[in-house]
Image: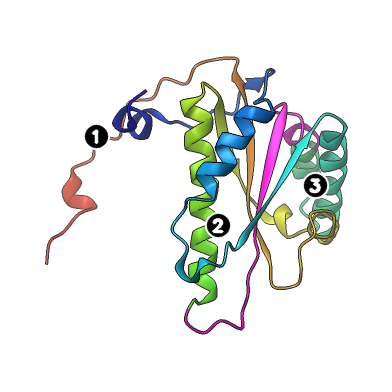
Amino acid sequence: MDALTLLTTRRSNKKLSAPAPNKTQLEKMFQAALRTPDHGKLSPYHFVVIENEGLDKLEQLLKEAVVEFNLGEERLKKAENLAHRAPMVIAVIAKINPDIAKVPTWEQLVTAGCAAYGIQLVAHAQGFDNVWITGKWVSGSALRQALGCREQDEIVALLMLGTATEKVERECRQESMEEFVSYL
């Protein structure tokens, strides 16, 4: 797949099943993530692969976050299903260093976000579908602890990866580029 096709055909898909990427395919995803723009060469990210029994742990951690933030019964049900929506989840953590004045926190967060997108693109290039999940629960104390977050770190993504059970056919947005682009 050429780069232009890759960039213009990636879509989020929540209907995923096995197989998930294997170790070699994961390695390629992480290699792409490490090539993200990174002012100061800080590598302000960490990735945690969650699969098999780890998905049961993730379910429990998400449920604990629902209780911690009093998100209600509906979100509790969603937490039960969310962790098992895909055969693999990659948590992307922004490892923030607030002591580096020339690279502010927001820039380190953006770098971690770009790394997450790099993973998504390489997953797509290898034939896997994926979706980027966030929400209040990524701030859950137990989840943050399980993923090795320090106080200043942020979980920027739970990337769900697998093989599409249904292909998502969405047209590209047809909005006028004038809504998004201007020239100085």
Q: For the residue carrying disc 2, how many other residues have a C-alpha within 10 Å: few (<14), some (14-19), or many (20+)?
A: many
Q: CA distance from mark 1 to mark 3?
A: 36 Å
Taking the spot 80% from the left edge, 47% from the top edge, the residue there is 62
What type is the residue that disc 2 sits on? Ala
Q: Does 29 sit left or right of 92 as displayed?
A: left
Q: Does 94 sit left or right of 180 as displayed?
A: right
Q: In terms of image quadrants, where is residue 25?
A: top right
* Mark linked to residue 62: 3
The C terminus - image quarter: bottom left
In this view, the residue in front, 157 or 47, is 47
Query: Image height check: is 126 above or below 65?
Result: above
Q: CA distance from mark 2 to mark 1?
A: 29 Å
Query: Image height check: is 123 above or below 95?
Result: above
**Region of the chain picked out in magenta, as a range:** 80-102
What type is the residue that disc 1 sits on? Gln
Q: Does 4 sit left or right of 156 as displayed?
A: left
* Mark linked to residue 3: none
Q: CA distance from mark 3 to mark 2?
A: 21 Å
Taking the spot 87% from the left edge, 41% from the top edge, the residue there is 57
Give whichever of discs 3 and 2 has the lower sequence position. Answer: 3
Residue sticking out furthest to the left: 184
Looking at the rendered structure, the secondary structure element under dot 1 is loop
